[in-house]
Amino acid sequence: MKIFLYSLFIIIPSVLFAQISFDADFESGNLKSVETINSTTFNITTQADLGVDGGSTRWFYFRISGVKNKNINVTFTNTDVTKAMYSYDNISFTRFSDDEVPVSGSFQKTFTQDTVYLAYYTPYTFSYLQERIKEWQTNQFVLLDTLGFTPQGLPIQELTVTDFTIPSTEKKTIWIHARTHPSETPSSWHFDGIVQELLSNKEVTNYYLTQFEFHLIPFTNPDGVYYGRSRVNFEGINLEPNWDKSEDATSNEVKILRARMQELNDEKPFSVFLNLHSQASSYCTFWVHSSFSTSSLFYTREHQFSNLNISDNPYFLQNDLRESDLKPRYPEGWL
Ligand SMILES: [Zn+2]
């Protein structure tokens, strides 16, 4: 499998002024333009998603060089970021403090190193995922499959995580997928945490692996992640509301995922199906489907499941539980 053939990064002309330069010439990078106000003050514009479902300008991920000991002032002109993240090593990211963000959507900071990376959320790139998969694959409970390839030639990968000594017929099936919207990197960190927990070799998780077969899709939209999109794939299609379209009217990614879901669900209906996203608000939302769009049994089970997640969880409050109608254009509704 050849998956590292891609050298077409987003090319942004570097802006050079007083030895400070900006670029996003790397995987998942997004920066459209930089307006120089003075030698240390800049306005940043992000690249909008292209295509029929395009328009979102949320995601940015770029590098500034030549900043050591300079008080840099940046305003983001077209993204809804409140407090951006920064990193000196491009691995460990820190959110700017209240003091460093006098006005929402900007920052001012004297950096202690010469190069700094800025992003909307902590990035989670395709290459990083491949490193993680390599680590996970050394575990006896993990099997990697490639379900198909995106229009840009990236694999849509599936991890099956279970105790393979127990026959499938004796286990329930769980499907979890993430990262349909590339800018929502917290959903990948959430996904990563789930895998890590399942492989933690605790008595309870090892027991789960004897009872459940986890089918885990880390990126439903690898092209969008790779090319630094906010909500669409490389071709400008938002995959999320494309599930009820005919085979010739929907995207490659949805076709590949639908076929696999159909195959597994025909063998045995999924016991749990999770579609991981993330939001920019300062609170969480745990969506469950309204009773009149499903059935009273399904509605009860969704509330039970949601409450098991929300109760005693410091990241959720009861108000975070919201209802929406199940619609066939979304993966849950299609299923
Ligand atoms: Zn989303």
Image: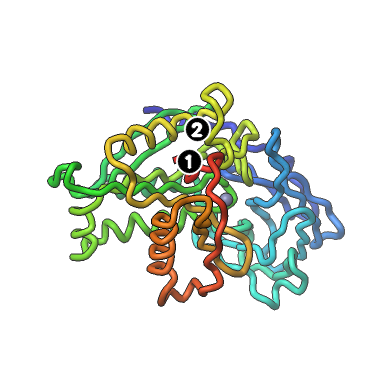
Residue at the location (66% across, 46% down)?
30
The residue carrying pointer 2 sits among few (fewer than 14), some (14 to 19) or many (20 or more) residues within 10 Å by Cα, namely: many
Q: Give above or below for 138 relative to 312.
A: above
Most distant residue in the left direction:
165
Label 2 CB sits under 8 Å from any ligand 1 atom: no
Q: Quadrant of the C terminus?
A: top left
Residue at the location (29% across, 47% down)?
173
Of residues 14 and 155, the one nearer the viewer is 155
Residue at the location (58% across, 40% down)?
241
Q: Indicate the position of residue 190 as horizontal and vertical percent values.
A: 44, 58
Q: Give above or below for 35 relative to 159.
A: below
Residue at the location (76% across, 58% down)?
76
Residue at mark 1: 220
Q: Which mark is residue 253?
A: 2
Label 1 CB sits under 8 Å from any ligand 1 atom: no
Most distant residue in the top direction:
248
- Amino acid type shown at disc 2: Glu
| Residue 72 falls left or right of residue 28 | right
Location of residue 322 by image quarter? bottom right
| Residue 105 falls left or right of residue 224 | right
